[in-house]
Image: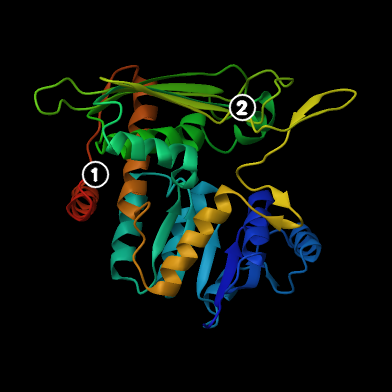
Amino acid sequence: MTPLRWAIIGFGRFGMVHAQVLQGLPGIELAGVSSRQAGPLAERAATLGIERVETDYRQLLDDDQVDVVSIVTHWKEHHQIALAALAAGKHVLLEKPMAADTGQCLDLLAAAQDAPGQLMVGHICRFDPRYSLARESIRRGEIGDIVSMHARRNLPVAPGNIRLDKISPLMGDGIHDADLMMWMTAQTPSQVFARTVKAHQYDYPDLGWAMLEFPDRDGRSGAVGVVETIWCLPPNVPTMIDARMQIVGSEGMITIDCSQTGLLVNTADRVKQVDTAFWPLQHGRAVGILKEEISYFADCLQSGSPVSVVTAAEAARAVVVMEAAEQSALCRQPVEVDLPGAICSGLEKIAQEDPSR
């Protein structure tokens, strides 16, 4: 089998994580990396033994030998770079959120529909067995009809303070749980009510809460989902990320706890929790949930199968819902979720292929 030649656009901390995963996967050749900052780019690439570096990502897109790109840039750059990559005929793994607003998501949906390459947005939690197995339990009817969901995804003040000049907690992390709730219920919320609180002088609020109201179904009241994202926990909390979800059904309940990794390192001055789930290095190789996500996309490309675990329409819907939440927080009123026709069409196609979606 001819290896997939894969390049990475955006080579900060998470771009390096993508590279470590790709270097450990069979059938993939890391073809190059790109970042505007020449000095850090060369240093990081040398650390991982990557030879080709470009300060202009278009050099990678113009290379006919590059088959796939991971786009791991600032989220407000996703739109422009992903459009260019699709136009160049590349397969695209685009980190979430899909784009900065609904209009940009619609542009990407239209471009992907006409492009020879596939587009997948990295909603990594769909590849976490704790959530995917919970969804399977729901699909089997083990807890009856979902009536309530409450998710939290909270961070200590660092790295929260590193992020708060770049993206809001709701769009940065709340989007994970909103997407999961829609995946679990196979529904789109009809309206959102949200509040944010600004505790420090960053560009974005330190925390956000959003209540998602799901539509009634078969004469029964719809479910309610609460998304909690706080990026200003005390710096000494012994957790990397306090991520949990409780799903209450008419006949049972599911509790998902991702707040503990099972590995605590106590030093003289702190307690450190070590990642064992998302992208840890084990015996010099990246393992974990990100590897599952990237491996899945690579398998789809090598087999010629369409991406189905998370589709572009679902990723666009998540942006619409979080955009509505942020609008609600500004006006302090509930905001209706109005999905554009292109997203509705994509979701209808998914439902026809898989009624549980």
Seen from the viewer's position, the closer of residues 133 and 267 is 133
Seen from the viewer's position, the closer of residues 85 and 300 is 300
Point out residue 271 in the picture as x, y percentages from the top left corner: 79, 25
Give, as a three-letter code, the residue at label 2. Answer: Leu
Point out residue 136 in the picture as x, y percentages from the top left corner: 35, 40
Secondary structure beneath dot 1 equals loop
- Checking the image for residue 356, the label placed there is 1
**Picture layout, residue 107 above or below residue 147:** below
- Residue placed at 61% from the left, 35% from the top? 163
- Checking the image for residue 77, the label placed there is none
**Picture layout, residue 66 above or below residue 213:** below
Secondary structure beneath dot 2 equals loop
Cα gap from disc 1 to disc 2, whole angstroms: 32 Å
- With 320 as the anchor, is 242 left or right in this view? right
Seen from the viewer's position, the closer of residues 139 and 236 is 139
Tell me if label 1 and label 2 are in contact, CB under 8 Å. no
Q: In terms of image quadrants, where is residue 79? A: bottom left
- Bin the neighbour count of mark 2 within 10 Å (Cα to Cα): few under 14, some 14-19, many 20 and up: many
For the C terminus, the image quarter is top left
What residue is disc 2 on? 155
Q: In terms of sequence position, does the residue under pointer 1 or pointer 2 come before the other? A: 2
- Residue placed at 76% from the left, 63% from the top? 48
Q: Closer to us: mark 1 or mark 2?
A: 1
